[in-house]
Image (cartoon, helix red, strand yellow):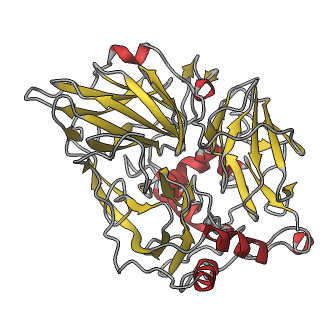
Amino acid sequence: MSEMPNRRTVLSTGLALAGSTALASRADAARADAARPGPGSPSRAPSPARAADTYVAPDGPEVLEAEAKRGAGPLRKASLAAAPSSRELGGGLTVPTWTYGDHLPGQAVRVTAGDTLELALTNSLTQSTSLHWHGLSLRNDMDGVPGLTQQAIAPGAASTYRFAVSHPGTYWIHPHSGVQLDRGLYAPLIVDDPREPLSYDKEWVVVLDDWLDGVEGSTPDAVLDELTKGRGSSHDAAGHKAARRRAAAADGDAPSRLLVGASSDLLGGHAGDVAYPHYLVNGRRATDPSVFEASPGDRIRLRVINAGGDTAFRLSLGGHRMTVTHTDGFPVQHTGTDTLLLAMGERYDVLVTAGDGVFPLTALAEGKDASAMAVLRTAPGALPPATARPAELDGELVTADRLVPDESVALAAREPDRTVRMTLTGSMDAYDWAFDGKPYDPAVRQPVRAGERVRLAFTNRTSMWHPIHLHGHTFALAGTALGARKDTAAVLPGRTLTVDLDADNPGLWMLHCHNVYHAEAGMMTVLGYLR
C-alpha cells in the first residue's frame, strides 16, 4: 500500500464544516445517535395505504437498525442554500439560474468515511425542492425523493439531513424534484478514505454539464413541456405544474430545444433529445475555461462527475494517458486508457502524471457536435482554442464492462435468490419513456427481501440509450464474472444489461433513467424491501 502524499492541493476546498467533531462516549449512545435524524429532518412521505403493511417504511425500524449498525462517527455539520442566482459562464455570458450558495458548481461537501454528516438545506426557490445524495448507501428517509422517502421542502422552508457516511468515494448532490437538476443545483460530495491507498500530489474535481437555463429565455421546465407536448411530468410529485405553466408562458419566445440528428455509434444510435446551447466544465464555457495549475511531474487525481441532464461526455486530457482507479466511488484494478465515456450520473477517478506545457481537458458532447473544455497548465503559454480536440479522444476507450473490481470491494460469486426483469419502453415521438410500458407510480414496487442476492435485468426495447441509476446501493456488472461495482450504467438500444446486488439496505429505493427528461416523463420505478 502506497503512502499518503506529503502535499495535496484540492481545487475545490469545499464547504466549511461548522462545529466541532463529536464522538459518542458509549456504544449505546453511538447507536442511538446514528438512528436519530437531525432537527427539522425532512418528513417521510406517507406510503400509499395499499402498500403500507407490505413494504419497509423509509423510517421504519428496519431502516433505523441498519443505520445503527453503520455507527455514529465524528459529527460534521454543513449548510446549503438553494436560491435564484446570476452566474457568469465565461466570455461575458451571464444567465439567471438556481444554484447552491451562488456557486456553479456548488462548493464541494467533503467528509471522511465513518463520519456522520448533518447538512441543513434552506429553500429560497419559488418551487419546492429536495436533496439527493447520488451514489451513497445511506438511511432511506434521508435519500431525498419527494413523494417516496420524504415530503418536499416548501419554498421558504428549511430541513436537515443527517446520516452516517460509510464508504469513501466520489459522489454528488442534486435535487430529486422535477427537472431542477438541469439548472445549477448540483455540487460534488467527496468522501475521503481515512486509509487512502493512492499516492498523489494534487486533486482536481471536474464537473461536466450541459447548459440551457436562462439562455434566450429557456428553462428546463419549458423544455420538459416542449418534449412532452405539454404533459410535463408523469407524476408531478413536487407539485410543479403551475410553475411549469408559468415557465412556458414566460418563455413563449424561447427557441425550440428539440434535438434532431444527434447520433453516436458508442451510444448505439440516437445520442440525445435536447439541443443545449452550451457545455461546461466546472461552470465555464470553453471560450473562457477554468484553469488548473500544477507542476511538471505532479501526479494528479481527477475526480470526474457528469452532472448533465441529457448528454454523455467523452473525456480526454491532451498529451496524457489516464489510469482509471475508481468508477462510481468504488476502486477497480488500475487500468490505462486514452479516453472515458461518462453517462449522466457516472463518476470516474483517474490518475495522470502532468507533462510540461498547457493541455486541454476536452469533454466531447457525445453525438452532439460540440464540446466543453478546461485547461491543465504546468508552464507558461497560450490557452488551447475552445475547439481543441485532443487525439486521445479517438484513442483507446476503456468502458465500465472492461474494468475489474478491486479485491476489497468485489462482490462474492453467488447464485441470485431473485431475478427482477424490466423492459425499457417508449419513443422520442410520444415521449412516453417508462419501465414495462407503465409510467412511474410510487405505489408500484419491484419487491426484494433483505439478505437476498438480487439480479436486475434491463432490456432496452427503445431506439435510445438510457443510463440507469439505483439509489442506496451499488451493483456489480454481471457477465462471465462479476465486474466493477457501480450505481449508474448505460443500457444501449436493443441490448440487455444484467447487474447483481446484495439487498442490504432496507427501504423504498428509486430506480430510474438518469436522463432527467426521461425520468420525469415516466422512466422511474421503486425497488421495495418486503417486511
Q: Is residue 298 above or below residue 182?
A: above
Q: Which image quadrant is residue 49 in?
A: bottom right
Residue 298 position in % (x across, y down): 22, 34
Q: Residue at x 15, y 34 (%)?
A: 295
Residue 501 position in % (x across, y down): 75, 45
Q: Quadrant of the N terminus?
A: top left
Q: Which image quadrant is residue 425 in?
A: top right
User: Which residue reaches farthest left?
Assistant: 380
Q: Residue at x 82, y 39 (%)?
A: 414
User: Which residue reaches farthest front?
Assistant: 1
Near-viewer residue (231 or 72):
72
- Answer left or right for 439 relative to 20: right
- Answer left or right for 316 relative to 244: left
Residue 220 position in % (x across, y down): 51, 51
Near-viewer residue (529 or 495):
529
Q: Is residue 518 visible?
A: yes
Q: Residue at x 72, y 67 (%)?
A: 148
Q: Quadrant of the C terminus?
A: bottom right
Residue 314 position in % (x across, y down): 45, 27
Q: Is residue 230 visible?
A: no
Near-viewer residue (488 or 385):
488
Q: Which image quadrant is residue 208 in?
A: top left
